[in-house]
Image: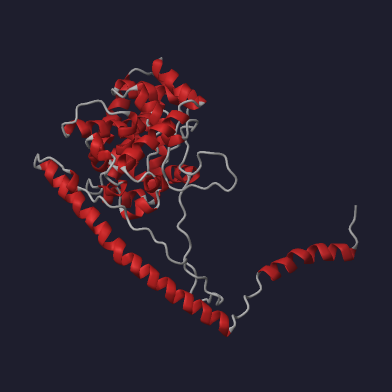
Amino acid sequence: MRLGPILLALLLLAPGAALAERAAPKAAPTAAAIADYQKKLKEYQAARQQFENEAGPYWAAIAQMRRTRFAKRRNGDVVLLEDYVLTQPPVYAGPPRPVDPSPPTDEEPRPPRKRIPVVADFLAMAAEHFKFVPQRPKSELDYKRAYARLAAAAGLTREQIVRIYGFESGGNGKYDVQAGLEYDRPGARAISTALGYNQLLTTNTVSLLAGKGDAFVKALRGKAAGLDGDARKNLERKIAVLARMVAFAKTVPNQWSEHDKLANTAKGWGVHALNLDIDVGPLLQTQKLLDSILFARMKGHTAPLSAAELEMMNLTGDGNGFDMVTMPAAMRAQVPTSNFFQRGGYERNPVASRNNVVAKLLAATDAKMDREVKLQGARDLAAAYSE
């Protein structure tokens, strides 16, 4: 069917007209609107300054007390209740920042929001910088079996891996699940680079390669020795790529801050794609939890860690998690969770702020685990472990 010239012109004109309407410059605000904005801005700034006058010293005290506790443990001294900040952090309760009614100018562009890379980015950077394409599992169950075998061999219990999987990946998460994308919701977006069953950040992956990469290479060489033909050749090529990635991770001092810098480069994104590989991914996911258990043992804590306790080390870092794990039960009901976070991390973590003492946070973690392990993904992982 042919469109008449008038109808065609209207169809072609309408999008442009709508675009022009959307792009129309914002009208200049009235003098009254500007005065009202400036008044509210002053009120907001005064309230924020009052809040910062309280929050700054509070979080400085948190950091100082943490250093004191770590020093006491190094010296073999007992950590006491008074070694923690026992008050809750101040909460901003003033007015919100007012919206400037003035139209934005070319001289004052809004800074773009930093984009969080996703799986497609990790894969693209792995291909570009390392000529590497992860060998994906044939099925989700194949990955679970590979992970369960390694976890069991490392001494992790079924309860630990299944409950932490449930907590971290939502009970049904796949091996490539990313933080913020655990559930199929409209408008969902990644909130961090955390990936896989135990939600490793890009920095975790780089750090694990720097510290344990040689052992990973050795393990895969042992596996390759039992293969032949194309299977062996393919694995040997993968080992060569892994060795280059390990060498890349070792180009900086063995410190978290240095690993974080590497992790936020294009090559660092490419390294993170290892978590998607059926041979290397389970090694990384297992080692993350095993390192926390070994850390606790090194510090003299030989009692088995519950899944919730191990998750605290996974969530807050080994040092802070160990601080909670070794705390007497009577103290857990009194010590605020803010003692174990940096300020920014705490303020972005509603679970930690809502469950604002250690006992509540552990209980909330256990409750979430109780719910999530009933889902099919967690049940499949439990079955894979039993095999």
**Tally of numbered tags:** 0
Vertically, is 289 above or below 181?
above
Q: Quadrant of the C terminus?
A: top left
Residue 179 picture quarter:
top left
Q: Give the image's coloring scheme.
A: secondary structure
Residue drawn at the location 53% of the way across and 77% of the way down: 105
Q: Is residue 375 left or right of residue 214?
A: right
Q: Nearer the viewer, residue 212 or 86?
A: 86
Vertically, is 273 above or below 16?
above
Q: Nearer the viewer, residue 27 or 106?
A: 27
Residue 363, image x, y percentages: 37, 35
Residue drawn at the location 29% of the way across and 24% of the way down: 154
Q: Residue furthest bottom?
A: 31
Residue drawn at the location 41% of the way across and 27% of the way down: 234
Q: Which of 279 and 205 is in front in this view?
A: 205
Residue 239, image x, y percentages: 34, 31
Residue 57, image x, y percentages: 25, 62
Residue 61 seen from this side: yes
